[in-house]
Each structure stands twice: as C-alpha cells, then as structure tokens.
Amino acid sequence: MAEMITEFFGIDVFNESVMKERLPEATFAALKKTMENKEELDPQIADVVAGAMKDWAIEKGATHYTHWFQPMTGITAEKHDAFISPAPEGKVMLEFSGKELVKGEPDASSFPSGGLRATFEARGYTTWDCTSPAFVREDAGGVTLCIPTAFCSYTGDALDKKTPLLRSMEALDKQAVRILKLFGHEDVTNVSCSVGPEQEYFLIDRQKFLQREDLIYTGRTLFGALPPKGAEMDDHYFGSLKERVSAYMKEVNKELWKLGVLAKTQHNEGAPAQHELAPIYSTANISVDHNQLVMEVMKKVAKRHGLECLLHEKPFRGLYGSGKHNNWSMVTNTGKNLLSPGKKPNENLQFLLFVTAVIKSVDEHALLLRWSSSGAGNDQRLGAHEAPPAIISIFLGEQLEDIVRQFIEKGDAPECKQKSYMNIGVHTLPEIRKDATDRNRTSPFAFTGNKFEFRMVGAPMSIAGPNTVLNTIVADTLGAFAKELEEVPAGEFEAAVKKLLQRELAAHERIIFNGNGYSEEWREEAVKRGLPNEDSFIGSVKALTDEKTVEVFTRQNVLNRTELEARAEINYENYSKTINIEARTMLDMVAKLYIPAVIRYTSDLAGSINSVRTAVPTANVTVQEKLLTKISGLLAETEDAVEVLRKARSAAYQEKDAKLQAEAYRKNVVPAMEALRTPVDELEGIVDKNTWPVPAYGDLVYEV
Ligand code: ADP
Ligand code: MG
C-alpha cells in the first residue's frame, strides 16, 4: 500500500506540533512569543527546549547536532558535535544544553568575511534562529540534528545571509504595519513577507558528468558545440517525464516532505534534461532555509540514481539557462495578502499604495536588485537565449497598467478592465474565467496576480540576498509613505493617497514595461528611458556601496556601511576566483585532452593519406587533405588562444586590489576564454566523434 503523505510529512522536523506535545505549556507559550518576534528568548526556556529537542532527535537516531548556517559562500555550512559528555566509570551521557542550542562558536576564519573579521580575531558566533524549525537529517552518514542559525562576528556584524534577511523582515514588518494602521487595520500586528521560489535544474547521467572536467570543477560546460536539436521543437517543456527522472523526483519529494518542505509542482522545463521544482510559498526565512534543503536534497538524491543535478545558471551554452523565480508578497498576521488586488483594484487604494511602493523601490534600486540576483554564473544567462535581460523592468499586466495610466493622467482610476470568459468553442468543457493579465515570460520582474515574480535570480543562488534587498527597499519606501500620510488630517486621507499615487507613478513610470523583454528594441528603449543596463555582475557590485544604498540599508537597520563594503569585497574576490578556476580548467582541458586528441586524429588522417597514396598513387585524397589543413589551422588558432589566455590569467591573478582584479578578469580573461572556446568548438564539429575526448552536448542532455 502506498504510504500516506499526511503521515510522513514533516516527521523529521521539530515543528510546532512536536513542541506543543513535548514542551511544558508555559515554555511553549513563551517560545511562541519569541518566534512571533515579540519577546527576547529567556535562557531558562532555551534549556528546556534543548532538552526536548535532544530527546526527540535521539529517538530519531541522532548522534550529533550541528548549527546549520549560511555564510557568504551562498551555500550552507555546518560543524558537527556529538551529544556525548563523559560520565563516571568510563561511560558517556548524552547532553545538550540551552547554551549549546543558542550559541555556537565555529572558528570563523575560513569563511568569507570581506575584512569584517581579521584572521587574528577569528571569533564568529552562530545563534539559534527559533523562527525556522530545527530538523534531523538522515542519510548514509547517520542522523544529525540541524539547528538553523545566524552567523555574526564578535562585533555583531553579519557574516552570513540570514542575519540581514531577518533584519529586513523586521523592517518590512514595522513599516507595512504603519501603513495598515493608516487604513484603519488596528487588528494587524505583524506583516511578514511570503516567498515561493521555483527551482530550475538539469539532470544528466553521472558517468558522463564524471568525464567532463569543466562540469566537475565549474558546474558548467566551458566547451561544447550545440547538438543538431536544441529546444526549438518545444517538446520538452511540460513533456511527459522519463521514468528515470520521475523515479528521481519521487525520492526528492519524499525526502523534502519528510523535512517539512512543501514541494508541490514538478515538470520538464524548456531545454532537454531541464526540470523544475516549485514549493508552496512560506515565510521568507523558512523559504530560504527550505530552498537550501531543496538544492542539497536534489544533488544528493541524484547521485543515488546515477545522475548528477546541475544547478548552474548556464550549464550548456545555446540551451536555456536555469533560474529561480522568486515569488514575493506581503501577508498580514490576519491572513491578508497585501498584493491581492481584490474585485475592484482601481478603487483599492491600499493595494495600489503597496504596489506603488514596490514600483518606486524597484526603479530607485534597479542596479542593486540586479546585483542581488546574480553572480559570475548568471552573466552567462542574463540577456542570453530566452532568459530575462540584465535590465530591470516591471510587467504589470493590462489591467493594472491601465489603472496606473489613469492615475497618472487623472489622479484617480474610475475604470477597471474586467476579467472575461474564454470562448473555447466546446460546450462540454467548463467555462473558465480569464485571468486579468496574460503571462509575460520575458519580464524580469512581473506582477502575477497577487505577488511579484522576480525572475532574474540564478538557479544556484541563495534567495536570501534578493529577498533582503526587496524587503529593505520596500520597507524604506513604505516608511516614507507612512511619514507623509501620517501627517494628513483624517478627512483628507483618501485624497492625499491619490495625490501620492499620481506623483509616484508618474515619477517611476519608466520602469513599467509590458512588451517583449527579450527584444533588441527594448534594449534601445531602456537606454532612452535611462534604465541601468549593466551586462556584467561585477559592474553591479558598485550598487552595494552607493550612497543611496548605504543610506537606506542603514536607516532600516539591515546592513551598515562596513557590512555592505565587506559584501562588495567578497563579491569581487568570489568573481575572480570563479573566473580563475574556469580559465585554469579550460587551459587544462585543452592541454591534456583536446590538443592530444586532435593531434592523434591528424596523424591518423596523415597516415591515411599516405597509405592511400601508396596503395593507389593516382587516388584522390583531397577530402583528407582539406580536412587536415582545416584542422591544423584550428589547432594553431587554439594554441595561440591558449597563450593569450595564459598571459591574461596570470596578469589578473597577480593584481592585488580585489576590485581591480575582478575587473581584470572580466575585461581580459573572459574574452580570452571566449577566444579559446571558439576554435575548440569548431574542431568538435569536424573531428571524428570517437576521438573526441569528452561527451558531447547531445550525449549529455539526450541520454538521461
Ligand atoms: P507559475 O509562476 O508557474 O504560474 P504559480 O503562480 O502557481 O506558478 O506559483 C509559483 C510560485 O509562487 C509557487 O511557489 C507559489 O507557492 C508561489 N506563490 C503563490 N502565491 C504567493 C504569494 N502570495 N507570495 C509568495 N509566493 C507565492
Ligand atoms: Mg513562475
């Protein structure tokens, strides 16, 4: 009999129902208050919770616990401690105190800190984030209790991605509640931000993966000619799942459900071997943690199925890249979605005020948002084949755009385009109401009915960054709106809101774009509108230390100047390291694989020319000769490109200043990598397949 999902969903999570069952009533009540952000944690309570958590974990077979945190590497980190402590007569007891639950002290010097913590002062602290539930992780390595934590330096500076996220959630909460008070919602005490990330990924055969150094070291192919068939037939998107893939998805879902992750949707994506998994949305920090678990489980389970899960933004040039659509909204503790337009959005001033706050914030901080969604890998994807452009714009859909236009023109929106019924032409099919907006898949930031969908985010990234930025900039705008409106006499409130809407929408109309974001015309139009079009990630890093950013992030208590500067520094370093590894991998593959293989092939060809001539002196060998000439030419081109790349890489490598170094990699190394790729890919197209030393694109994406 099939197992019931309802029975095993969340069994590995120390969730509210477990706490309720295992904690004394008063402890549970006090903890709940802290979780809802109302009270500081009482150390005595921590002791009780730790005891219950330990008993629960040990019953599940746990031997170790770990503070699970998210340093600025973008992935998670953990250090495991056994529960044991010495007991008389050479025995051990199992212990876990409140102190151990609340605080950990990993030697932090090996995590990126961007100078926030000098190595001689290596102290870093992990602190329990009780708003995200602890869980046990079970695999061949045993069972471990994982405690979600924030990671800070001795001075309290954030060394991780979770701390600023939590701070930004508080900021958004505070400012949104202020606005809601003005609209008379005295019952709302808390606004949280809801996030649902759709995760795209590729799944390929692991044996083939292991034959490609580039995939192993960099997560993407650095060489590779396109197969004769790409995604043009549109037959993979939503296509039926191959059994090997669905068996994989089944196990991924089960593992995730046990961990309390609301994995909901799965389907094939646009490119061959590309898929997607989307959960039901939850509160931002839980979503961030869960997304890390999703990525971790997807990678781990793949190996068990002889597969490899690729999360890189662009594993294969010329095929679709992988993103992570970040769906974002704001929800009150009374269960109201603040971005829900209701039946008459044109009259719903509160909704329009929140939407306008998002529009204004996105326009004012477009480059920062672009920064938050990208990295070296996303440079390969943004603006490329069917991916969002690197220019930020907002798609509102017909209905909302019409309302915006009315407000700009008249200071009010008396009319509203209504939903209509679809005429399918078959009477036995139920009538369906059309959505007020069609989808626009080409927009990087789209209003999709009751949430905004930020589509630039790269597939492997932590979604903490983009959501921290969104929360912070929107909080700041809401704060400014609240300040302005709080001063308005009650009777004039509505008129004041309308005036504000008209003013702000007119000022930020330029960011709204409903057309085709993939088109060349849009690029030109965007330039005219003065929207930033930064084609490289490192070009966007400057947004972090821009005065405007520093001001807003300081005002909202999310990141101070030092923390922002540290992040910029880490980005530069990380970019340089990524490109450096890619360049070295290319050089290695060319020297050890491609050149030797091609030379072998040319000697075969030469040998064949000679033996044919010996056998039949009058035979025509022009095909072989032409091929040999062409290949030798490309081989020489390859060798020249190797020299250029080698020099560019070592010059960049020696640069001391982090920013200058990243720029050197971008300006000199990246083009040299391109120049090396071109002749090698061309060679792949003409050299005998059996002599090509690595699996081709076709073998990788079609043979799963
Ligand atoms: P698609 O974008 O493919 O049409 P959906 O719109 O159904 O898919 O949902 C995409 C993601 O958006 C899901 O993870 C879903 O849970 C999430 N989502 C839906 N409503 C909200 C909301 N109010 N806030 C945040 N995320 C949401
Ligand atoms: Mg989507």
Image (spheres, rainbow, N blue to C red):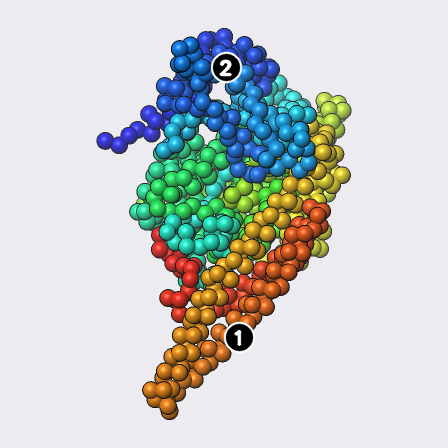
Which residue is at 39% across, 14% downward? 91
- The answer to whether residue 56 is visible is yes
Q: Position of residue 401 (x, y in %)?
A: 61, 44
Quarter of the figure with residue 280: top left
Which mark, by number, is residue 648? none
Q: Position of residue 299 (x, y in %)?
A: 43, 41
Q: Position of residue 567 (x, y in %)?
A: 66, 38
Under circle 1, the secondary element is helix
Which residue is at 41% across, 29% downward? 137
Is 497 in front, or is 567?
A: 567
| Other residues around mark 2 within 10 Å, as few (<14) / some (14–19) / many (≥20) | some
Which residue is at 73% across, 24% downward? 486
| Other residues around mark 1 within 10 Å, as few (<14) / some (14–19) / many (≥20) | few
Quarter of the figure with residue 559: top right
- Residue ID for mark 1: 633
Under circle 2, the secondary element is loop
479 in relation to 540, above or below: above
Which amino acid, by three-letter code, is at mark 1?
Gly
- The answer to whether residue 408 is visible is no
528 in relation to 357, above or below: below
Which residue is at 58% across, 60% downward? 673
Q: Quadrant of the N terminus?
A: top left
Is 286 in front, or is 95?
A: 95
- Residue ID for mark 2: 97
Distance from label 1 to label 2 (Cα)?
70 Å
